[in-house]
Image: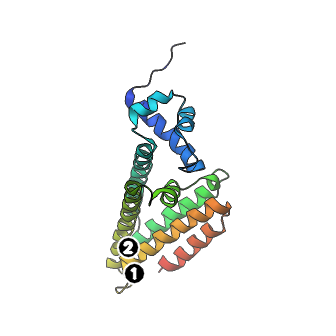
Amino acid sequence: MQTLKLDKHDKRDLILAKGAAVMMRRGYHGTGVQEIVQAAGIPKGSFYHYFASKEDFALAALASIYQPRLQRYAQALSNADKAPLARILDYYRDLQAYFSQPQGVQCHCFIGSLSFEMSEAVPAIGEHVAAVLDESVRLLAACLREAQQQGALAAEEDCDNLALFIANAWQGVLTRLKVGNDLAPLNAFVLRLERLLQP
């Protein structure tokens, strides 16, 4: 049987995927390069071929995880087949359904873990985390403004502030899920969001 050889991009993606999964579970400080390469099934030297350090790996992992997530968020919030507020509610209801599955509640928020552990120690990580969070707020605010223009939100509503409030509340939900494996904060968030956004 012939062994499948990975090209350099595939191998880098493999290291990112497997290593990020370990770092999500164990945190930045709880994960060493040895754990990353063991998860990826590669020799330690291959890690340093693609990443200068564990910090460099964490930055690359942030980009590889959150760039596609931001793209999906942007697509969901710009879906012209739905009213703007329905797009927001459906997005978070889908996340509620996902986290309600047996494997979902075991998931951890990579960006939350890194921000708690490393934002002050490594400014580049803090800046990347802030950029991801700021972009998610910007996308949400744009969708809220569209709803406002259509008369679904009050004209005096501060859409930037509302978007920031929702995004911060969601980050709190993710923290509670990691700490307690309890769906109550998630369900409370969705219920409050429905009351906040439904006309």
The image quarter containing residue 181 is bottom right
The residue depicted at 62 percent of the width and 59 percent of the height is 178
Q: Is residue 178 above or below residue 3?
A: below
Pointer 2 with pointer 1, Cβ within 8 A:
yes
Residue 134 placement, left or right of 188: left
Which element type, helix, strand or loop, lies under badge 2?
A: helix
Mark 1 burial class by Cα count in 10 Å: few <14, some 14-19, many 20+: many
The image quarter containing residue 157 is bottom left
Mark 2 burial class by Cα count in 10 Å: few <14, some 14-19, many 20+: many
The residue depicted at 42 percent of the width and 52 percent of the height is 66
Q: Is residue 49 above or below residue 192?
A: above
For label 2, the residue is 144
Of pointers 2 and 1, the one earlier in the residue sequence: 2
Q: Is residue 74 above or below residue 157?
A: above
The location of residue 143, given as percent across then percent down, is 36, 69
Which of the two residues, 45 or 156, is positioned nearer the viewer here? Answer: 45
Specify the amino acid type for callout 2.
Leu
